[in-house]
Amino acid sequence: MTVWLWVGFVALIFALMALDLGVLNRKDHVIGAREALIWTLFWIGLSLAFNVLVYFMYEGHWLGIGIHEGPDALLELPKGAAIPPPIPTGDAQISVRIPGSVAALEFLTGYLVEKSLSLDNIFVIALIFRYFNVPMNLQHRVLFWGIVGALVMRGAMIGAGVALIQKFSWAIYVFGGFLVLTAIKMLVSPDVEPDLENMRLVKLVRRLYPVSTELDGNRFLTRLNGKRAMTPLFLVLLIVESSDVLFAVDSIPAIFAVTRDPFIVFTSNIFAILGLRSLYFALAQLLHKFHYLQLSLVVILAYVGVKMLLSHHFPIPAWISLCVIAGVLTLGVVGSLLRARYVKPEEPDELEGPPEPPPVEQPGEGAKDEGAGDGPEDPEKKA
C-alpha cells in the first residue's frame, strides 16, 4: 500500500515543477540575488515542512510505511537506529516498526548531507555557463530541465543502490571505501578546471549530431543548412546532466550511511536537488569566497565513508551524524567568513572560452580592404 505514498510524492514534485516553469517563470528573465534568496528559503522551508510530515507518516505508519516484516526485516533497517523490535516467535513473524522520531531525524540528516555535497556541483555549473557564455536569462531554463533529468537518473540510481545493499550486505563496505578514497583524492589533488571543449561527451555529441555555433533564443533544437541541429544550449544541458551523474556517484552512497529506507533516501535526495537552482543563483558569484568549504566537504565524505565501514560492527546513531555534519559545515562557513574579513581574497581567474575562429573573407573583400588604405588619411586619426 505504500506505493500510493510514492505516487503522491512524485505527483507533488511534478506539480511544483510545473508551477515553477509554467506559471512563475514562464518568461525567461535574469534571476537576481534577492529573488534567488527568497526561492532558496522557500525550498528549505518546504523541505522542513515535509520533514514534519515524515514524522507523522512514520509515527502513524500511514499505508504501512515504516513497517518491516519477514525474516529479513532486521537486515533492511539502518544499523544503530534506536528501534526496539518485538521478540519474535519465529523468523517469519519478525516485525519492526520505525518510529516517527527516527525517520524524521534520518530525513533531516540525509537532506543536510545531500545539500552540502551539492555545493561543489554549483561551482562546476558556474564554470560550464561561463565557458559557453550562456546568457543569464537562459540559465534558469537549462537548470530546470537539468533537474528534471536528475530526478529520473537519481531515482534509478537510488533504486539500484537499495536493491544492491539489501541483497548483498557487503556492498556497504564498497560504498564506504569509495567515499573514503574520494575524500582523499579531493584532499591531495589540486583544483583543476575541467577541459570542457575536449570532453569525451562533447566530442561524441558533435560527431553524432550537428551542433550549431549560435544560440536560437531559448530553443534546444534549431535548423542548420536545412537540417535539424542542436543549439549550444542543448549541449550545455547535456554537460550539466553528466556533471550531476558524477556528483550523484558520491552523494547517493553517502546517504546510505544515514538510512537504508528507500522512501527517506529518495525524498531527502529530491528535496536537496529541488533547491539547487535557486541556491546556484544565490551563491554562484560568492562561492569562491568560501575558502574552507572544500575542506568541509572532504571531512563530510570521509566521515560518512568511515561510518559505512563501521556500520556492521560499531554503528553510529543518526543524531551523532547530524551533529557532526552540521558542525563541520558551520566551521567551514564561519572560518571562510573570518578569513574573508581579515585576508584579502584572491579574485578567481576569468574562465577563457574557446578561441574565436578567424574571420572568413568574402570574395573581393580583401581587395576592398587593401584599397581602403590608398585614400586620403583622416587628419584626426593621424593626429
Image: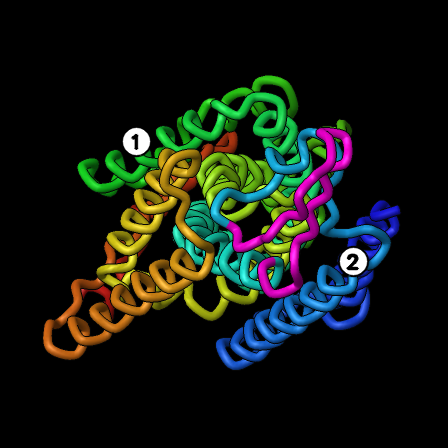
Q: Few, some or many C-alpha atoms within 10 Å of disc 2 (few <14, some 14-19, many ≥20)?
A: some
On screen, residue 304 versus residue 88, left or right, reads: left
On screen, residue 82 versus residue 85, left or right, reads: left
Which residue in the structure is indicated by mark 1? 181
User: Which x, y percent locates residue 378?
Assistant: 27, 64
User: Which x, y percent locates residue 236?
Assistant: 55, 42
Vertical position of residue 199 compared to residue 150: above or below: above
Indicate which disc, 1 or 2, sits on the residue closer to the N terminus.
Answer: 2
Does the magenta portion include 95? yes
On screen, residue 287 versus residue 270, left or right, reads: left
- Secondary structure of the residue carrying tag 2 is loop
Q: Few, some or many C-alpha atoms within 10 Å of disc 1 (few <14, some 14-19, many ≥20)?
A: some
Colouring mode (rainbow / by chain / secondary structure / one colour): rainbow
Vertical position of residue 302 compared to residue 278: above or below: above
Which residue in the structure is indicated by mark 2? 61
Q: As rendered, which of 369 and 82 lies closer to the eye? A: 82
Q: Are marks 1 and 2 in contact (CB under 8 Å)?
A: no
On screen, residue 31 versus residue 145, left or right, reads: left
Of badges 1 and 2, nearer the viewer stands 2
- Secondary structure of the residue carrying tag 1 is helix
